[in-house]
Amino acid sequence: MVAGTHALNAGLTFVSNEDYNLILVGGFDPTCNDSHAGETLLDGQHAVRPLYVAIGSGNLLIQRISFIAGFSPNAGGGLVAVSQSGNVNLSYNQFVANHSASTAGALYARSYSGALFLFGNLAYANHGNEVGGFIVEQDVGTGYLLNNTLVSITSDTPAEPAGLGAR
């Protein structure tokens, strides 16, 4: 994805049951020759979830993208990333000032039967009715959560953790 701030009037959505991998990497220049041109920001403008991705049996990689000021009435104010039977890898992303009226203010990630990897992500100032930060769900397979930082995460539900819900 090209570096820069992308103010979204509608959220970006990709849903597919085909057996293909999907790779979304931020920070590229307009010609996609230089992958270190700057930061890629998807700005929901406090009105929409920046990105919703659900794929079938392919692997999903989302890397070096900032999800800012997202809002959803459902889970995942900044990002929803789901794979039915492939791996989900979310690494070196930032989640800032996202809100969910439901759960997972920053991120809802799920792999039904593949591996789930969350590496080096930053969440700051996200809020959810239940769990303000990340909700990660794994049905079958292994989940890896390493070197993620969650700061100033809030939740309206005292019985739920504010930062991370792993299920």
Image: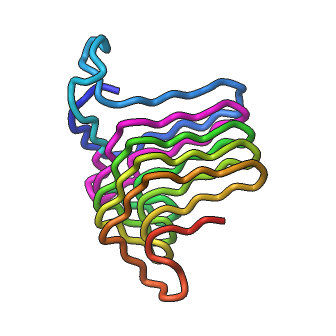
- Locate the N terminus and report the quarter of the image it occupies: top left
Q: Position of residue 76 (x, y in %)?
A: 48, 59
- Whether residue 81 is situated above or below residue 131 in the rendered picture: above
How many numbered marks does the figure carry? 0
Q: Residue at x 70, y 49 (%)?
A: 142
Within the image, what quadrant is residue 113 found in?
A: top right
Magenta stretch containing residue 87, yes or no? no
Q: Residue at x 62, y 46 (%)?
A: 116
Q: In the drawing, does residue 33 fall left or right of residue 50?
A: left
Q: In the drawing, does residue 34 fall left or right of residue 63?
A: left
Q: Residue at x 41, y 47 (%)?
A: 120
- Locate the C terminus and report the quarter of the image it occupies: bottom right
Magenta stretch containing residue 56, yes or no? yes
Q: Residue at x 35, y 39 (%)?
A: 65
Q: In the drawing, does residue 132 fall left or right of residue 30?
A: right
Q: Please state which of residues 117 and 38 is positioned toward the viewer in this rendering.
A: 117
What scheme was used to colour the molecule?
rainbow
Q: Position of residue 24 (x, y in %)?
A: 45, 30
Q: Position of residue 78 (x, y in %)?
A: 40, 54
Q: Position of residue 92 (x, y in %)?
A: 38, 42
Q: Looking at the image, which residue sits at the far front? A: 147
Q: Looking at the image, which residue sits at the far bottom? A: 158
Magenta segment boundaries in residue numbering: 43-69
